[in-house]
Amino acid sequence: MGDLLEYRDRFPILAETTYLINHSLGAMPAAVEERLAEYARAWNTRGVRAWEEGWWELPLTVGEQVGRLIGAAPETVSMHQNVTLAEAVVLSCFGFEGERRRIVYEEGNFPSVRYLYQAARGAEVVVAPDDEGVVEAIDERTLLVPVTHVLFKTGRIQDIEAIVARAHEAGALVVLDAYQSVGTVPLDVTALGVDFAVGGSVKWLCGGPGAAWLYVRPDLAETLKPALTGWQAHERPFAFEPEQDYTHGAARFLTGTPNVPALYAATAGYDVIEEIGVERVRARSIEHTTLLIELLEEAGFEPGSPRQPARRGGTVVVKTPDFEAVNQELSARGVLCDCRPETGLRLGPHFYNTDDELRFAVEQIAEISQRGARAAAGHT
């Protein structure tokens, strides 16, 4: 996998830091600056003509590239500002007046997603302890199952196959949040049979903020009418008709004016991931996370991520004593990771990281933790 290190020079921040926070914000490709300059040049030189020269179609053309990364059929992926809005578009397709008004998801679901579904008027929300609990909780009263592919706190890959099978058996629809997987864990939405999938570009796709995506199963898309809609979803948007007439395919789920600069920027990261291939990234990720777990255990820590590679995403978590302070000191030393309540430190190496960087990071964690323990005992 050493050849993947040839990509390091495309990510300038790697020359200055030990960058292990890719589960939160992937390193910026140098090409982003040129993409944003291209956007600025188009605005500056083409003005309003830029809309008809590519800007208007960006939510779909960029969505096509995401679609190739997730095994989606053509014209099934649209781009949105963030995952909360993408899932809100899905949610707006349904009412919760009848008996089928349950929403079932797992305890480890990301808070922003939970807040959205909790606010759904008329819905009955059921929170299960884990993916197995989700399967058990789904019944004929269940309408939506908005679950996570890889849990953000632990990096655990959930058993989505079992959830999809049970949901479809009961007549429910699955909304898969793949934010923490796409770009480092292979995903084929067509083979998996999910009804909807969402994700963003901030993390493993190295695409930056403001560029989230929404996949809708193609046969399902033709019948849904999202209430959260806008003129980009109209069959004839420039006719400026007073009533909505939904268009077809992915465009049916668009809203208003797209986030043009974010879409320009995002493609730089997508290009690299597509060039390498997610399978190669995944193989390197398994090597990295396995090494991290071994190093942490040798240093006397107990990692909180799954030991089984097939159930482990790209992140390794470890709860050190006073992990908030450890994280701050690591940052001061140029080792960038993060921490979460009840979970501890989160370490997310990507394909461009080296084994030596992982060894260095764990050495720093051990040294900082030991120094803190000595200080607590009154030693210097």
Image: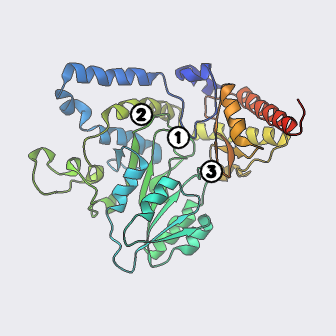
> Given this view, does label 3 or label 1 mark the residue nearer the observer?
3
- Tell me the amino acid under the disc marked 1: Gly
Q: Which residue position is annotated with label 2?
A: 266
Question: Dot 2: within a 10 Å radius of its alpha carbon, few (fewer than 14), some, or many (20 or more) residues?
Answer: many
What mark, if any, has residue 354 been given in the picture?
none
Question: Dot 3: within a 10 Å radius of its alpha carbon, few (fewer than 14), some, or many (20 or more) residues?
Answer: many
Give how far across and how far down residue 51 sits, in percent. 20, 32
Front one among 228 and 267: 228
- Give the CA distance from mark 2 to mark 1: 13 Å
- Tell me the amino acid under the disc marked 3: Lys
Q: Which residue position is annotated with label 1?
A: 183
Q: Which residue position is annotated with label 3?
A: 153
Q: Are dots 2 and 1 in contact, CB under 8 Å?
A: no
- Image point (30%, 37%), residue name: 58
Give how far across and how far down residue 94 sits, in percent. 33, 67
Q: Determine whether 190 is above or below 239 in the image.
A: below
Give how far across and how far down residue 282 sits, in percent. 61, 41
